[in-house]
Image (cartoon, rainbow, N blue to C red):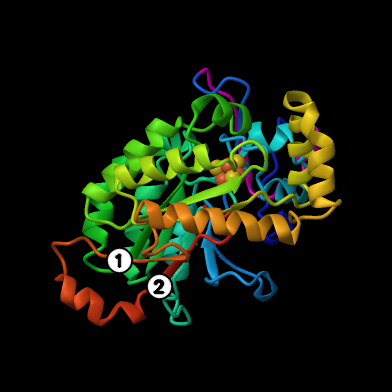
Amino acid sequence: MRWDGQKLATEDASALPGLRRMAGLLRSTRTPEFSGVTFHEIACKSALSRVPAQSHMPFEWTINPTRGCLHQCTYCFARKTHEYLDLDSGRDFDTQIIVKTNIVDVLRRELAKPSWKHEPVALGTNSDPYMRAEGRYQLMPGIIRALSDSGTPFSILTKGPLLKRDLPLLAEASRRVDIGIGVSLAFAHAHLQQQVEPGTPTPQARLDLIKAVSDAGFACGVMAMPILPWLTDGDEHLDLLFSRLAAAGASGVTAGALHLRPGAREWFLQWLAREYPQLVARYQGLYNGGTYASKDYRHWLAGRVRYFQSRHGLTGRAAQLRVLKAPSTRSADSLNADSSTLPALSLAEPTLF
Ligand code: SF4
């Protein structure tokens, strides 16, 4: 999606040079609570984005209330999308955050159209809807209400414990629509997590989130991606991570090797060269200039993942995390009876969180 499609008449001369053309820009602002970050508040023209058919995603629609992400994951596939905004996929993606301040009103209008078919909508595909900025803008409660009021099922994938704030609202919404919740966590140790994803909450904070989601009556699937060759793919790490996920109440886990797509590749390899220069040649050999690790490696890793999924009882809903309503709304039997009709939250891709 390019900004041309969002075009409104306003333009703010105080925006950074590359942002002069940002359509719908209302203002660019900084605040002491977010050091080094600029928020570009825009009035968007659309809220629902259709997923291109060639992307092979298991859903057709997404909502991203923000662009750019304070979680700053070095491996993030969404980095490339910042280039569509005349921003770079590195530091700008981490610090130049576009906020669709009117998204709730726009979404309600779109959901009210007779042509809307109430297909499942995924949140958390290009930016984390519960990054810290959500505490400032508080867009998610309105989005959740708009979706549930319209009878639209949806899924959320996040690394942000701020989702706990909305669990009562989500439980209420689950009485009307099917909701899937997933948490992204691929690191057992905070030291490496802070290196690779410097803006994300600690592993313990996310384990606490998984427990809170589970305690609220939702199945909480976990995406343990990306697994980093020679850094987090060892048996000791996978065993520790999966045991903690199981103890926290995760309903299933999907794990797979790092992808190095253009946009993420440059950023991640810069980080690798800085922090683990001894691994650069090994990564180059493993990825051979492409997006995916070698077939042999992926096959080997899949075997280790299956072993630890089984060992920790995380096999049930590993590949696809089906929506589970809050327990007070349906009996277990009725859930089983119509589970085939429930929308699925796929954790097949690391950016889909
Ligand atoms: S991978 Fe997700 S949480 Fe990390 S920077 Fe990208 S959008 Fe944000």
- Extent of the magenta region: 16-32
Label 2's element?
loop
Residue 143 visible in rendering: no
Residue name at image x 56 percent, y 59 percent: 303
Residue 156 as seen in the image, left or right of residue 337: right
Residue name at image x 49 percent, y 29 percent: 189
Mark 2 close to ligand 1, CB under 8 Å: no
Residue name at image x 56 percent, y 62 percent: 348
Residue name at image x 22 percent, y 47 percent: 215
Q: Is residue 271 above or below residue 212?
A: above
Viewer-closest of 264 and 13: 264
* Coordinates of residue 228 in the picture (x, y in percent): 64, 42
- Please state which amino acid type lies under the numbered disc 1: Asp
Q: Is residue 110 above or below residue 76?
A: below
Q: Quadrant of residue 342?
A: bottom left
Residue 230 visible in rendering: yes
* Coordinates of residue 352 in the picture (x, y in percent): 55, 56
Say whether residue 122 is magenta.
no
Report the Cα–Cα distance between label 1 and label 2: 17 Å
Dot label at residue 343: 2
Question: Which residue matches tag 1?
Answer: 149
Q: Is residue 72 above or below residue 42?
A: above
How crowded pointer 1 is (Cα within 10 Å; few <14, some 14-19, many 20+) is rated as some
* Coordinates of residue 108 in the picture (x, y in percent): 41, 63
- Which image quadrant: the N terminus? bottom right
* Coordinates of residue 209 in the picture (x, y in percent): 34, 40
- Please state which amino acid type lies under the numbered disc 2: Pro
Residue 289 as seen in the image, left or right of residue 180: right
Q: Quarter of the picture for ligand 1?
A: top right
